[in-house]
Structures are given as C-alpha cells and as structure tokens.
C-alpha cells in the first residue's frame, strides 16, 4: 500500500496562498493517505462496516455490492491502492457541504480515479461519495480558478458559479438526464447531442448479450447532480450517478440462470418467472468548450437483485 512516502500533491490548481478553499493541499494529501490505509484494511477483510466509515451514497452501495459478491462467490479481491495525486480541485464555499476532488493514479493499474470528498457539517468526517475511474492517458483539463486561487465550481441550487457568475440552473442536470434517456433509447430526444463514447458502447454490448428464452428491458435514470467544475478553456466537468435497472421476463418453458455471473451472488438458482437487477454507475462527463459532451470515466456495479 502506498501511503505518505508515495503520495504527493501537485497543488498548481489550488496554491497554498489561496483564500478560503474547501481544503488545502497538505490536508488533502493527509486525507488521501488516511483513506488509502483504511481502504486497504477494508478490502483485506471485505468489511462493509469499515467501508461505511470511508464512503457514502451511491459509491458505498457500489463498493458494498462488490464486497458482497466477492464474499459469496469467492472472487479474488482487487484492492484499491492509491498512488501519486496528480491534481487537486478545491472550490471556495460559504456554507456546508464542502467538497473537493483529487485525481490519483491506481497502483498496478492502467487507471486513475477522480475521487470526490464531501464534508456535510463542521463536525462530520470527510467521506468519498464519487470515484469514477479513467484511463491513465485521459486528461481532465485544467480547472478555472478564481482570484483567491480556488477552483470555480457550480451550485446547482442557486444556479451560480462560485465566482458569482450565473448560468441556467439546471444545465448540468438536463445534460445528465438526456444522457440517461439516450442510454435507455438511442432515439430519445437530445440523443444526437452526445459524442459516441466507450461507456455507451459498453452498455449497448451488455444489453445485447442476453440469453435466449427471456424478454429483456433496460432502463436508466439520473440521480441529482451535485458536483460540477468549470475548466479554464470554457469546458465543464460533471460528476453524476446513473441508476440502471435490468428486467427479465422468462418465456414459457424457459429458465434464467446467472451462474458464473455477479448476479448469482443474489440469485444462485435458475429462475422461471422474472428477475430484476439494480446497478449504479458513477460517471464523469466532459462538456468541451467546442464539440459534443462525452463520458470519460466511470465506476459502477450491481447493488442488488431479486427474482423468482
């Protein structure tokens, strides 16, 4: 596990002379180190209670689901090991919740993770609520900074950026809602506004790779968008969680068996009637200053299933 000796922060985005950002570079480095060490213990024991002391929201549900599947199916555990922090994105806030983003390479992986740390109150701990994975070669872009050195972030409640400028309040939510609608139906209104990205391609392939003897339907919805960052070139980064539901209706004289798939942790026996599988996918969408929005990173998994 890489901790203090292998964890440094490049604080060009939020210099030490910044005004009142959510967090300083040194404190962020310490939090990343603490998370790294505690996550390594939770991964070793597959202890969901330990995980709940580090994460919250949809991310906790995703990773708790992975722990459950690993325990039930005897799957090999792949620890989350953070390497060097390459970027810190921290805005300034007048009230709670506070949040910031660190981008870290993952040890023994060709990926990096953009982790959103959130603190709900002055006495609450910092918890990671979103953690989409990106290819190591993926560039997020340089955040735009205000005069105090803090990153300019969006408040979806007021419709204001942290530098005081305004924009259409629901712009980020509308984009993610349209993206979810496009995943459900490629012909949905607004589908043409998005670039063809690898996440859509992967989800289309999964939806098409279904067994015979069942009627299959997949539906997507978007959770509330809370974390948006403005880039120095005029682009935007949007962190979002997508809710995916896979529904199966078994045809007469057929059965549905999830053997050797993660769903078998919940549904170990063949089914004769129906099944519902619930997933969460956390995505990072890049809205470039010119060109079409696309998802550049994601982390997701099965969080529950039921059937008969």
Image: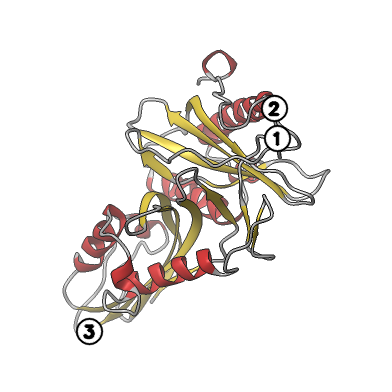
Q: Residue at x 38, y 77 (%)?
A: 308
Label 3 – label 1 distance at C-alpha:
56 Å
Give residue 268's position: percent from left, percent from top: 36, 61
Q: Position of residue 274 (x, y in %)?
A: 34, 79
SS type, badge 2? helix
Q: Nearer the viewer, mark 2 or mark 3?
A: 2
Q: Is residue 171 left or right of residue 124?
A: left
Rendering coords of residue 85 (x, y %)? 51, 27
In the image as oriented, which residue stretches furthest toward the right? Answer: 123
Give the mark toward the camera: 3 or 1.
1
Rendered residue at 56%/70% (across/down): 170
Query: Looking at this view, is 123 or 174 the one in front?
Result: 174
Answer left or right for 92 relative to 287.
Answer: right
Is residue 277 visible to us here? no
Local secondary structure at mark 3: loop
Residue drawn at the location 21% of the way across and 86% of the way down: 252
Q: Which residue is mark 1?
A: 23
Reading the image, the residue beneath label 3 is 251
Kindly indicate whether the residue at mark 1 contacts the one at mark 3 (C-beta within 8 angstroms): no
Badge 2 is on which residue? 27
Of residues 281 and 173, the one drawn nearer to the viewer in this rendering: 173
* Snapshot colouring: secondary structure
Give neighbour class at mark 3: few <14, some 14-19, many 20+ (Cα, 10 Å).
some
Give residue 168's mark: none
Q: Position of residue 116 (x, y in %)?
A: 58, 44
Task: Describe the element under mark 1 as helix, strand or loop.
Answer: loop
What residue is at 67 percent from the left and 23 percent from the top? 26
Could you give the CA–CA distance between mark 1 and mark 2, rounded to whole angstroms?
7 Å
């Amino acid at each position: 596990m890489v901790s203090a000796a292998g964890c440094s922060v490049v604080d060009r985005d939020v210099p030490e002379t910044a005004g009142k950002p959510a967090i300083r570079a040194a404190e962020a480095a310490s939090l990343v180190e603490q998370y790294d060490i505690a996550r390594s213990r939770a991964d070793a024991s597959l202890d969901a209670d330990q995980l709940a002391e580090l994460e919250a929201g949809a991310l906790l549900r995703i990773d708790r689901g992975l722990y459950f599947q690993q325990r039930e199916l005897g799957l090999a555990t792949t620890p989350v090991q953070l390497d060097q922090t390459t970027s810190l994105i921290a805005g300034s806030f007048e009230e709670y919740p506070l949040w910031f983003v660190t981008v870290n390479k993952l040890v023994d992986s060709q990926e990096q993770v953009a982790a959103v740390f959130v603190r709900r109150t002055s006495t609450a701990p910092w918890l990671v609520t979103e953690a989409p994975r990106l290819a190591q070669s993926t560039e997020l872009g340089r955040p735009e900074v205000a005069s105090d050195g803090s990153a300019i972030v969006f408040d979806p409640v007021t419709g204001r950026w942290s530098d005081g400028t305004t924009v259409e309040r629901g712009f980020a939510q509308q984009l993610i809602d349209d993206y979810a609608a496009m995943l459900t139906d490629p012909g949905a209104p607004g589908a043409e506004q998005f670039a063809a990205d690898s996440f859509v391609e992967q989800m289309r392939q999964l939806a098409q790779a279904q067994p015979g003897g069942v009627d299959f339907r997949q539906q997507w919805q978007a959770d509330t968008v809370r974390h948006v960052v403005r880039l120095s070139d005029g682009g935007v980064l949007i962190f979002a969680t997508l809710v995916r539901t896979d529904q199966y209706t078994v045809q007469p004289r057929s059965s549905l068996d999830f053997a050797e798939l993660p769903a078998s942790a919940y549904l170990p026996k063949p089914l004769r009637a129906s099944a519902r599988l619930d997933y969460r996918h956390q995505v990072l969408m890049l809205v470039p200053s010119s060109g079409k929005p696309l998802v550049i990173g994601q982390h997701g998994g099965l969080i529950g299933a039921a059937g008969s």
